[in-house]
């Protein structure tokens, strides 16, 4: 019974992850520099202002790294379309 419960939990988590991935907003790195500019972020998250973007730019280099972008999304700082 325990093996079944663990297997079921594993399958359920994979299914939930797939459903979440379908709803995820994708920010495209259109210039291919490996970071996300304000313009690239706003294309996916139109409500992001310069102030919100600056707060998410932890290292203050003018672009968001993948980690900075993920942190801002996870924190709810960026609202989807």
Image (cartoon, rainbow, N blue to C red):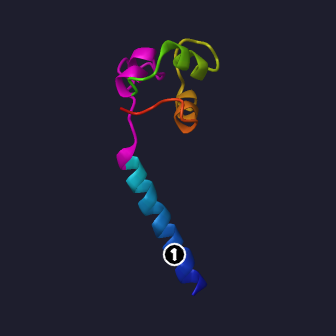
- 6 or 20: nearer the viewer: 20
Q: Residue at 48% across / 22% down in the picture? A: 35
- 74 or 49: nearer the viewer: 49
Q: Give the range drawn in magenta.
A: 22-44
Compared to residue 78, the image places residue 59 above or below, namely: above
- 1 or 79: nearer the viewer: 79
Is 12 left or right of 72, judged from the image as shown?
left
Membership of 20 in magenta stretch: no
Membership of 27 in magenta stretch: yes
Compared to residue 57, the image places residue 20 above or below, namely: below
Is 74 left or right of 31, judged from the image as shown?
right
Q: Position of residue 31 (x, y in %)?
A: 37, 17
Is 5 left or right of 26, judged from the image as shown?
right
Q: Position of residue 62 (x, y in %)?
A: 54, 12
Residue at the disc numbered 1: 7
Q: What element carries label 1?
A: helix
Farthest residue, direction bottom: 1
Is 53 left or right of 15, judged from the image as shown?
right
Q: Residue at 47% across / 67% down in the picture? A: 12
Q: Residue at 45% across / 16% down in the picture? A: 38
Label 1: how many Cα within 10 Å (few below 14, some 14–19, many 20+): few
Farthest residue, direction right: 59
Q: Residue at 52% across / 18% down in the picture? A: 53
Give the quadrant of the C terminus. Answer: top left
Q: Where is residue 80 in the image (x, y as percent from the top left)?
A: 40, 33
Report the predominant secondary structure element of the magenta stretch. Answer: loop
- Answer with the quarter of the image where residue 46 lies: top left
Q: Where is residue 11 in the image (x, y as percent from the top left)?
A: 46, 68
């Amino acid at each position: 019974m325990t093996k079944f419960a663990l297997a079921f939990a594993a399958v359920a988590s994979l299914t939930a992850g797939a459903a979440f991935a379908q709803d995820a907003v994708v920010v495209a790195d259109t210039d291919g520099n490996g970071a996300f500019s304000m313009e690239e972020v706003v294309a996916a998250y139109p409500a992001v202002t310069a102030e919100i973007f600056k707060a998410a730019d932890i290292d203050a280099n003018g672009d968001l790294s993948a980690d900075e972008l993920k942190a801002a999304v996870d924190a709810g700082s960026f609202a989807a379309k």
